Amino acid sequence: MPLLLGVNIDHIATLRQARYAQAYESTNAEPSPVDAGHDALAGRADSLTIHVRGDRRHMQENDAFRIRAEIPLPLNFEMGVTEEMLAIALKLKPDFACLVPETRMEITTEGGLDVAAGFDKIRMAVARLQDAGIKVSLFIDPDLKQIESARETGAEMIELHTGCFANATGDAVETELQRLINAAHAGHASALQVNAGHGINYTNIKIILKIPHLAELNIGHSIVARAMRVGMTTAVREMKELITLYPA
Ligand code: PXP
């Protein structure tokens, strides 16, 4: 199976909200996440990822429903494990849901879910989403205990948090890569689909491709940043070209 690219377009909404937080539905509110989704499709994205956060700092519910209705790509809905988000997900019916930790003050998702600590709540959320036909992924640190707990929830997929790897310098790069490689082996051995994301860019992707058993990468910030120079379609196409180097 070729490695797939999920494009996270939250930052398109971040830019719009910087000016149109109160009037995001007005006709002059720009840029449009729906347009960005169409452009990502033209660049051969395999799926779109969006995160409606509890504080609505970027994507709004309305964006999620429009993207779902208008863009013919599989949709991955990132969500905190709350009743509010479960209700939205069950109505939205994305193809996939990725459960993430969410804290109010963080700039972006800062670490993986502690599945072991929140096991009962997470297992219940996984079951409710799956009952609605939504495949579930758990965003976790590359930690063997978390992988074992993720398997026990019944989730089909894990997304390995690559943020520590992306922030590492010097010898820590190899250490963090090795953690990801070990976690990918463990996830695969547990029959979980192994995805990865956070902080992946056009440079570190070459190292990320050393991780075995990967099915999909979720990349947002770097693609949106590159899009400011070359446009969204080209930015996505360039990343797709890099990930086709992944050994089959
Ligand atoms: N995966 C998850 C679970 C995330 O929370 C994010 C950030 O929203 C990403 C992937 C994408 O990370 P980045 O924007 O750093 O590429």
Image: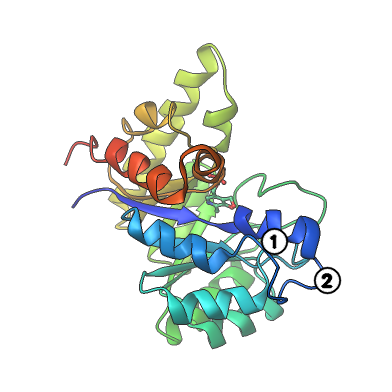
Residue under the image location 48 percent in, 37 percent down: 200
Residue 200 in sight in this render: yes
Q: Position of residue 242 (x, y in %)?
A: 30, 35
Residue under the image location 51 percent in, 38 percent down: 226
Q: Position of residue 188 (x, y in %)?
A: 30, 49
152 lies above or below 178: below
Residue under the image location 70 percent in, 59 percent down: 16
Q: Indicate the quadrant where residue 119 lies.
A: bottom right
Hey, what amino acid is under mark 1? Answer: His
Q: Nearer the viewer, mark 1 or mark 2?
A: 2
Residue at label 2? 22
Mark 2 crowd level (few <14, some 14–19, many ≥20, 10 Å Cα): few
Q: Give the image's coloring scheme.
A: rainbow
- Mark 1 vs ligand 1: CB below 8 Å: no
Q: Indicate the quadrant where residue 245 lies.
A: top left
Residue 115 in sight in this render: no
Residue under the image location 54 percent in, 72 percent down: 123
Spatial CA distance of label 1 from label 2 is 12 Å
Q: Position of residue 75 (x, y in %)?
A: 44, 69
Q: What is the secondary structure assignment of the residue under circle 2?
A: loop
Q: What is the secondary structure assignment of the residue under circle 1?
A: loop
Q: Quadrant of the C terminus?
A: top left
Residue 245's disc is: none
Residue at label 1? 58
Hey, what amino acid is under mark 2? Answer: Gln
Q: In this view of the protein, which residue sits in the foreground, 27 or 23?
A: 27
Mark 1 vs 2, N-terminal side: 2
210 lies above or below 103: above
